[in-house]
Amino acid sequence: MKKQLIELRVNGRTYEIAAEPNALLLDVLRQQLQLTGSKRGCDDSSCGACTVLVDGVPTLSCTVLAMSFAADEQPGPEIVTVEGIADRGALAAIQKAYGDWGGAQCGYCTPGFMVTVKALLDRNPEPSDEEIRHALSGNLCRCTGYTQMYQAIKAAIEAEQKGH
Ligand code: FES
Ligand code: FES
């Protein structure tokens, strides 16, 4: 299939790339932009390991075409991957808390969880347990270490509330 030149805004940068019209966003991020944090964990839109933010909304990058987010005359939507959630080189609260609480085991699901938590805290800094569970209902962990993960999320919320 003939490649087309497109512009994508990712993690605060604009990339010009040649992509096939049917290229999935996940593949473009991983193979062309070398942003390999987002993972392919399934083949049926069920695991959330590939989650990225598109204008702040968690989006399964394995199910959408990169072309859908190309800028034409207007700036395209802002895509944020797990590599982009750190703030000027400082770990995001959820990244630090995962380290402190052992939130990751194999780590394969971690990027998807982290960007989903980031989106949740950006829109609701004081989520209830129910709201956390609801927000994360599309993210699965095969290692099943949910207890530490939830401890990390609660610690991140507390850190955000204290402003660090
Ligand atoms: S890889 Fe996208 S939902 Fe599993
Ligand atoms: S830590 Fe291994 S899949 Fe979640």
Image (cartoon, helix red, strand yellow):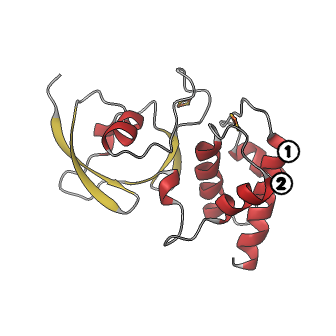
Q: Nearer the viewer, residue 117 or 101?
A: 101
Q: For mark 1, does the 10 Å Cα neighbourhood hold few (<14), some (14 to 19), or many (20 or more) residues?
A: few
Type of residue at label 2?
Gln
Task: Say which residue appears at 41% left-offset and 58% top-offset.
Answer: 11
Task: Say which residue appears at 77% left-offset and 44% top-offset.
Answer: 133
- Residue corresponding to mark 1: 147
Q: Secondary structure at mark 1?
A: helix
Q: Quadrant of the C terminus?
A: bottom right
Q: Nearer the viewer, residue 27 or 118?
A: 27
User: Where is residue 41 drawn, in percent x and y?
Assistant: 57, 28
Task: Say which residue appears at 76% left-offset and 50% top-offset.
Answer: 132
Type of residue at label 1?
Thr
Q: Marks 1 and 2: CB-CB under 8 Å? A: yes
User: Where is residue 94 drawn, in percent x and y?
Assistant: 68, 59
Q: Nearer the viewer, residue 87 or 59?
A: 87
- Residue corresponding to mark 2: 151
Residue 45 — which label?
none
